[in-house]
Image (cartoon, rainbow, N blue to C red):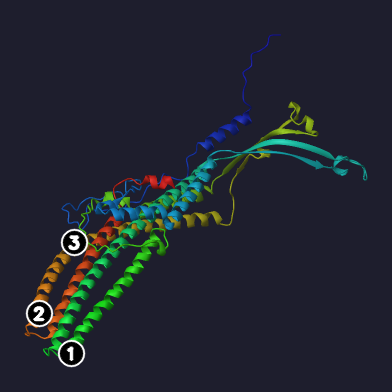
Amino acid sequence: MKKRKMTKRLPLPRLVIGSALLSLMAACSVEQPWQRPEASIPATFKEAQAEDNAGWKLAEPAEEAPRGQWWAIFGDPLLDELEHQAIAANQDVQAAAARLRQARALAQAQEAARLPALDAGFGATRQRASPASQSLADGAQVPGQTLWRAQAAASYEVDLFGRVGSGIRAAQADAGRSVALFHSVLLALQADVAQHYFQLREFDAQLRVYQQTVALREDTLKLVERRFKEGEVGELDVARARNVLESARADAAGVARQRVVAEHSLAVLLGKPPAQFAFAAMPLAPVDVPVPAGLPSALLERRPDIAAAERAMAAAYARVGLARSAFFPRLDLTAMLGVESATLGNLFHWSSRTFLLGPLAGTALSVPLFDGGRRSAMLGGAQAQLDEDVALYRQQVLVAFREVEDSLADLRLLKVQSAAQTAAVTAAQRAGQLSQSQYEEGQVSYLEVIDAQRQILQARLQLNRLAGAQAAATVSLIRALGGGWDATAGLVAAR
């Protein structure tokens, strides 16, 4: 009889099931690609007084943009050294770096959901069946049985409707937010070190003024006492001279107390106990460092707090997709392959092999039907969280603009104020010279001298305060713009 050539075909049920699985796996995710919400960004800053005020664009964070050692623009080697010490030893930075590592580890753990989970086991079980299960009479003796087993098991969740992918994207966005927050902590530390540094130098400048004032008033007291002995003035002038001298000493002690507190604060920023840090006296000179504000669309995007807010939105958006995927079927695949035998010696024989695979062995397509509204509530909560993060992002952008505008206005007006105060110091010093000479000639009372000296002191102190405010405003502007211009990616990688 002639044999007929047969074509091997898959059984119809397998073909149908396989086609259905492929269709499900190819189904598009319920989560659409993330798009950042638009934020209105003007082409220039109001306080920068640029000519072109037109133009709006989509804000895209550039957290990886170079930021670097922005403090180097001050050209101060001591400040450079303090900044490096703080970055290396500050405990807030260490804590932020640890949080970053935690977020990255969680993201890595979440990404493992894309791959099957494999487990292996080895062991023995001892069991004895009941007589009834063996259809034996009551009281029959059923011998016990030992079963040795070695097996490997695999489990895998097919990413239907993007549930696994949404979880991974949320974890990745959380890790990105931690990167931005690390940069935010780092930038805040760098700015705080610079602020404390210039504040200490401002206090030193104030103390120098007081030292000079005390020396001048000591000489004046000696002059008044000599004239009192000669009968040219009364004891009232001596008392007044001694009063202004001691007042200057008291004010100097108050500034010294403030300096001690600032020095202790700087020590903590450097990661040192106050007892192990000392800052030598170094009066502040005027700081006039031009900082280019640039385009808002280019520089504000570099702010780490804005980048963190954007990543928080991305994570919330992914969790909306995760909550929405709970309304759709879920497919989990499991399988087991191994060997089992009643004797350990036969365990690894070919005849001892065994496996479990199929719908009854762990392949489960679960379809949600009813949960009392729990999934709907979870989706509503996730959407509300996204709405909150969008509002916080837009608010952070507005705050960033305000901070830049404030710092630009401070620098512009402080420059005008400092110029006027310099002229005031010159005029006060001239008035002091005239009152002193006229007093020595007996043309004016000592009250005129005291008033002139007080005006000189206040004018010089105010000029020093303006110099400190100008340095602080420069640091604030750099911080508001997101930092400097050199790469710092290695800081994160090194930790």
Q: Please identify the quarter of the rendering in which residue 135 is found.
A: top right
| Mark number, residue 314 | none
Q: Are marks 3 and 1 in contact (CB under 8 Å)?
A: no
| Mark number, residue 435 | 2
**Which residue is labeled 3 in the image?**
412
Q: CA distance from mark 3 to mark 1?
A: 47 Å
Q: Please identify the quarter of the rendering in which residue 489 is found.
A: top left
Name the amino acid, label 3.
Answer: Arg
Q: Judge depth for marks 3 and 1 and give the one in front.
A: 1
Q: Residue at x 25, y 58 (%)?
A: 474
State which tag comes first along the sequence, 3 or 1.
Answer: 1
Q: Judge depth for marks 2 and 1 and give the one in front.
A: 1
Q: CA distance from mark 2 to mark 1?
A: 18 Å
Residue nearest the observer in this picture, 173 or 470: 470
Q: Residues within 10 Å of mark 3 (few under 14, many from 20)?
A: some
Q: Is residue 243 above or below residue 427?
A: below
Q: Position of residue 336 (x, y in %)?
A: 67, 36
Question: In the structure shown, which secondary structural element does the residue marked by tag 3 occupy?
Answer: helix
Question: In the structure shown, which secondary structural element does the residue marked by tag 2 occupy?
Answer: helix
Q: Residue at x 49, y 43 (%)?
A: 165
Q: CA distance from mark 3 to mark 2?
A: 35 Å
**Which residue is labeled 1 in the image?**
236
State which tag comes first along the sequence, 2 or 1.
Answer: 1
Residue nearest the observer in this picture, 100 or 284: 284
